[in-house]
Amino acid sequence: MNRRQFLQGLGAAAASAAMPAPSSTQQVQAHLLQLRQDGLKNARPYVPLQRLDVPPAESHPFVFASTPYPFLPAAGAPAITILTYTVPQGFNAVINFLAIFYNAGGIVNGSGNIIWRVLLNDTGYKGMNNLQSQYGTDAMPLPTYISLVENDTIKVTVEVAAGVVVPPGATTGARFHGYEYAATKSLGGM
Amino acid sequence: MSVELYLPNRKTLQDLYVPSEVELPEGDARCQVFNFAPVNPFEVQEVSWVADKPLVVWGLNGTMNNFTPPGAAVAAGFRVAIFQTHGKTKWAWMNKHQINANILGQQGLPFLLRSPQLVGKGDSLIVEIKSLVTAVQGNITRVQVAFFGVQPLFSMYPQLYADSGVTQ
């Protein structure tokens, strides 16, 4: 339906309902509504990349890992950050492999004794804000498609529940594999 | 109290922030609330809503309170993102999650959209919130995000209801 038909429709509806002809203000309102409806039809998606696992040709790959692997914090102590990455200005990024792991015995996955959190701009990443088990291994990070916008900071923190006996020398680490691409390639990213 | 004028147009300052009369169609007021509870520290939650009628959104509000009564306000706040789907296209209203104070008003002062946003009949809105409460702070909270808008009158804008099945 074009704009003219839309405005005619406005008049027809008014007439059929025995209402007075639309005022100039109502006609402008209808016109602006029509523009908005057209805008919806022309809306573009927010992630223009068709496949997050296929980097654009001009992208910059990266690999970041905790260096060295930090010791676990004491039981009940505040969380420590084991890996952090900030997307450079002018770039968006995708993390397509992620690993969060633990090097020692004595801790059972899923017990809640160790809690890892993946934080994006200091808020949880959905489903990864309270990890109680390892995610992948140092040698085999798992495919994980996290789309980042310029200046985003993503980090992994770890904390040990109060009362847990931490094996001496136990360390933990994380690993990000991904790529950066020029933000102008994106329509906004997310 | 004197009125500040926005010269040279001799309009009040609020004209810089509120939509003009022609931006909002005649219709019924609606407040669509997205409720998230309980929200744990660092937790991420989404709530979706499919518009049963077209809605022209002109204002946004958001609050974060303790889940347990009496529900005092929690200062930590949250980040929020809004996604709209129309047909097969989905897009975000902002390019990354925003701190609530940036885009959501409170109490009697909603954040006003200078240019209102149309949510078509059948469109879906997804609001995703991310608690900024840390594990140390530990607040379990209730978050509410409210969209204030106008539902255009069917009698005046039947075209907007074309796919709705509304026959009134």
Image (tube, coloured by chain):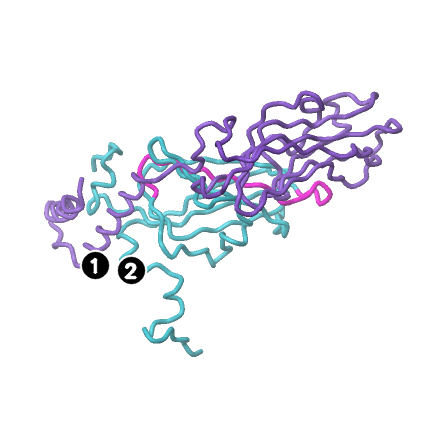
Chain colours: A purple, B cyan
Amino acid type for the residue under numbered disc 1: Thr
Find numbered disc 1 in the image and state the secondary structure of the residue it sits on: helix
Amino acid type for the residue under numbered disc 2: Glu
Residue extending farthest to the front is: A58
Residue extending farthest to the bottom is: B2
Where residue A146 sits in the image (x, y, percent)?
56, 32
At a point 40% along the width and 66% down the height, the residue shown is B14
Query: Which stretch did the figure color magenta?
Result: B119-139
B125 falls in the magenta region? yes
- Tell me which chain the residue with mark 2 is part of: B
In this rendering, the count of numbered labels is 2
Give the left or right position of residue B75, taking residue B20 as reference. Answer: right
In front here: A78 or A47?
A: A47
Where residue A34 sits in the image (x, y, percent)?
24, 46
Residue extending farthest to the right is: A168
Q: Name above or below for residue A66 compared with residue B29.
A: above
Q: Name above or below for residue A47 compared with residue B150.
A: above
In front here: B3 or A106?
A: A106
Where residue A21 sits in the image (x, y, percent)?
12, 54
At a point 58% along the width and 36% down the height, the residue shown is B44
Find numbered disc 2 in the image and state the secondary structure of the residue it sits on: helix
Kindly identify which residue carries mark 1: A25
Residues marked 1 and 2 touching at CB (< 8 Å) = yes
Kindly identify which residue carries mark 2: B21
Give the left or right position of residue A63, taking residue B151 as reference. Answer: right
A144 falls in the magenta region? no
Where residue A99 sits in the image (x, y, percent)?
67, 26
